[in-house]
């Protein structure tokens, strides 16, 4: 149908996601948003899952991922990549759930290949490169899943319970800065990767 395209469906789907959330997102609602009947959409996406995968791909692409810049140390690249990925997930309601519910589109694998190849030139084995990127990505997904699942400030009962646990209370109070908490986790992952590379671990794990 004139005016409809896969790109329009994905863009509109992301706007609808921000409005209603992942659980309420449906092909019927998307069609209503576009002012068409649901069957018209199936010329461009065969299933809802295909739509979600296209939306997930657009979110990932918005992070601007790619191999390290010229002269950029892999540690700084990995930190920059993780921060950009987190911000991309946070840019949409239920962004992390969207990503974890969708498979990576085949056309996105070319960019992934470029990243892995660049890491190999920096001293990683292919297995180490893959494990490193996946570990950082999985950490980021999990962190944002928790971040986006926050339902509000602690209840009176929760505060009362915490008041009886002074060490935990101090840890929670010190860890309220989510940006700092995320940065700490990435720092730990990078330090661990440095240790693995330094030890010459042949497993790449």
Image: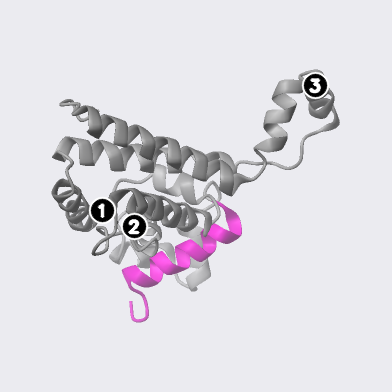
SS assignment at label 2: helix
| Residue under numbered circle 1 | 105
SS assignment at label 1: loop
Residue 87 visible in the displayed image:
yes
Estimate the spatial distance between the alpha carbons at disc 3 and disc 2, rounded to whole Å. 42 Å
Name the side, left or right, on which 73 lies relative to 151.
left
**Residue 62 in which image quadrant:** bottom left
| Residue under numbered circle 3 | 161
Check contact, mark 1 vs mark 2: CB within 8 A: yes
Sequence-wise first label, 3 or 2 = 2
Q: Is residue 7 magenta?
A: yes
For the N terminus, the image quarter is bottom left
Q: Which residue lies at the image location 24% right of the left edge and 58% below the top edge?
A: 67
| Within-10-Å neighbours for mark 2: few <14, some 14–19, many 20+ | many
SS assignment at label 3: helix
- Residue 45 image point, x, y percent: 31, 60
In the picture, the disc for residue 201 is none
Q: Which residue lies at the image location 22% right of the left edge and 58% below the top edge?
A: 111
Estimate the spatial distance between the alpha carbons at disc 3 and disc 1, rounded to whole Å. 46 Å
- Closer to us: mark 3 or mark 1? 3
- Residue 155 image point, x, y percent: 81, 33
Q: Is residue 196 magenta?
A: no
- Residue 79 image point, x, y percent: 40, 50
Extent of the magenta region: 1-21
Estimate the spatial distance between the alpha carbons at disc 1 and disc 2, rounded to whole Å. 7 Å
| Within-10-Å neighbours for mark 1: few <14, some 14–19, many 20+ | few
Nearest the camera: 158 or 182? 182
Secondary structure character of the magenta stretch overall: helix
- Closer to us: mark 3 or mark 2? 3
Nearest the camera: 12 or 27? 12
| Residue under numbered circle 2 | 57
């Amino acid at each position: 149908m004139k005016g409809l395209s896969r790109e329009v469906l994905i863009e509109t789907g992301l706007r609808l996601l921000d409005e209603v959330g992942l659980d309420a997102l449906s092909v019927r609602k998307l069609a209503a948003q576009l002012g068409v009947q649901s069957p018209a959409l199936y010329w461009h996406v065969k299933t809802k899952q295909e739509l979600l995968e296209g939306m997930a791909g657009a979110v990932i692409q918005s992070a601007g991922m790619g191999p390290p810049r010229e002269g950029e140390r892999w540690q700084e690249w990995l930190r920059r990549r993780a921060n950009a990925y987190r911000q991309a997930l946070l840019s949409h309601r239920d962004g992390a759930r969207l990503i974890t519910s969708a498979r990576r589109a085949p056309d996105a694998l070319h960019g992934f290949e470029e990243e892995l190849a660049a890491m190999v030139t920096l001293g990683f084995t292919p297995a180490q490169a893959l494990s490193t990127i996946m570990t950082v990505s999985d950490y980021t997904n999990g962190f944002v899943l928790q971040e986006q699942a926050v339902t509000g400030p602690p209840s009176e009962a929760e505060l009362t319970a915490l008041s009886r646990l002074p060490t935990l209370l101090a840890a929670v109070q010190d860890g309220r800065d989510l940006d700092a908490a995320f940065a700490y986790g990435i720092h730990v992952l990078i330090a661990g990767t440095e240790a693995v590379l330094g030890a010459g671990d042949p497993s790449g794990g």
